[in-house]
Amino acid sequence: MTDDIWAGGCQCGAVRYRLLSRPINACICHCRMCQKQFGSFFGAFADVPEADFQLTRGTVKYFNSSSEAARGFCGDCGTPLVYRFLSQPRIAVAIGSLDRHSEMKPEFQYGLEAREPWFAELHSLPGTLTGEGDNGVGDTPERFDRIRASSRQHPDHDTPEGWHP
Ligand SMILES: [Zn+2]
Ligand SMILES: [Zn+2]
């Protein structure tokens, strides 16, 4: 892992990509289409010129959500991966799919009309670390040990061809 490599991929590892430049315009979008694509409260993206996006493993499946956008994901595990602009040569990657996701701090938010009214309160919710105690639904340390020991999630770095969990 070096400072100039921007790569990422899906949860199962069937799709991996590499970017030839540092992504820019890191943002979140609350619009209803992004909420649906991510199955969450917002989408998070950073973009590169289309020519700087290279698939290094697998293929991306696309859903054309409008005449302006194709939203790409892994056909095997469903991880949202990209937002392809159909009228300009740029492609945005889902920040959470980047190996170096923490370095992509959003600078702007779009889609304010659909922002959840309690969005600003999320950071103050009570919380725990993963595996820290039982929240009442059987989240015992033993359960998290089993999850860690059996995880099939692809790691946050490139792996040799034929990688398998
Ligand atoms: Zn996958
Ligand atoms: Zn959006």
Image: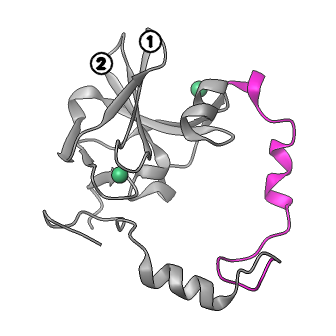
Crowd rating for badge 2 (residues with CA inside 10 Å; few <14, some 14–19, many 20+): few
Q: Count all numbered tags in the image, as a single digit.
A: 2
59 or 46, which is in the foreground? 59
**In the drawing, what numbered circle is on residue 68?**
1
Q: Which residue is located at x 42 percent, y 51 percent?
A: 97
The image quarter in which residue 134 lies: bottom right
Are the residues tagged 2 and 1 within 8 Å (C-beta)? no
Where disc 2 sits, the SS reads loop
From this viewpoint, which residue is outermost toward the left? 161
C-alpha gap between disc 2 and disc 1: 12 Å
Does residue 148 appear left or right of residue 158 in this picture?
right
128 or 150, which is in the foreground? 150
Q: How is the image coloured?
A: one colour
Give x and y (percent) for residue 11. 40, 57
Q: Which residue is located at x 43 percent, y 45 percent?
A: 78
Magenta-drawn segment:
111-135
Q: Of the residues under marks 2 and 1, which one precedes in the sequence?
A: 1
Callout 2 amino acid = Pro
Q: Quadrant of the N terminus?
A: bottom left
Label 2 or label 1, whichever lies nearer to me, is 1
- Above or below, 52 relative to 101: above
Quadrant position of ligand 2: top right
- Above or below, 30 relative to 39: above
**In the drawing, what numbered circle is on residue 90?**
none
Callout 1 amino acid = Glu
Q: Main secondary structure of the magenta part?
A: loop
Q: Which residue is mark 2?
A: 89
